[in-house]
Amino acid sequence: FTPYKNWDTLLKQANKDKKKVFIFFHASWCNPCRSIEKNIFTDSSIYTLLNTSSINISVDIEDTSMIELVKKYRAVTVPTIVLLNNQG
């Protein structure tokens, strides 16, 4: 996963690379989230697909610096996965 810094920077990179934006909303206490991270994202075919077709960010819904993204995509339950085109 790419560290999230700024929405505009993320979209510029997605446009430049002609990739989608994949957002994984999670929480430290979420067991299904941990299972997805451990069993799905580490699968070589999933890993390859995600990294060749999208810019991937991981968002902890309890991180106060991420509150705008959490609100924007209504990630009120976890896990939540959002896939966007390179325009957002």
Image (cartoon, rainbow, N blue to C red):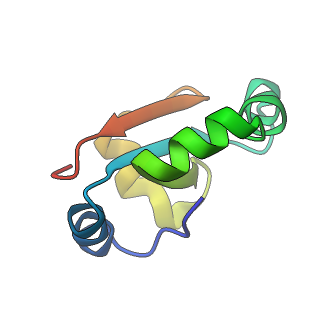
Q: Is residue 76 left or right of residue 20?
A: right
Q: Quadrant of residue 43?
A: top right
Of residues 27 and 83, the one drawn nearer to the viewer in this rendering: 83
Nearer to the camera, 76 or 32: 32
Instruction: Report the side of 84 relative to 64 (left or right).
Output: left
Q: Residue at x 30, y 64 (%)?
A: 17
The answer to whether residue 73 is above or below residue 54 is above
Inspect this view and state whether residue 36 appears.
Answer: yes
2 or 71, nearer to the observer: 2
> In this view of the protein, can residue 75 be seen by the observer?
no
Residue at image location 22% in from the left, 71% down from the top: 12
Height in image: 77 above or below 6?
above
Q: Position of residue 63 (x, y in %)?
A: 59, 59
Q: Is residue 52 left or right of residue 85?
A: right
Above or below: residue 45 compared with residue 10: above
Taking 8 as reference, is 2 left or right?
right
The N terminus lies in quadrant: bottom right
**88 over 46 or under it: above or below:** below
Please state the horizontal and vertical placement of residue 18, each as a whole percent of the image. Answer: 25, 57
Q: Position of residue 77 (x, y in %)?
A: 55, 26
Give me the residue at 53% from left, 39% from top.
Answer: 49
Between 47 and 71, the one lying in front of the other is: 47
Q: Residue furthest left?
A: 87
Residue 38 quadrant: top right
Residue at 23% from the left image edge and 70% from the top image edge: 16
**Number of numbered discs overlaid on the protein picture:** 0
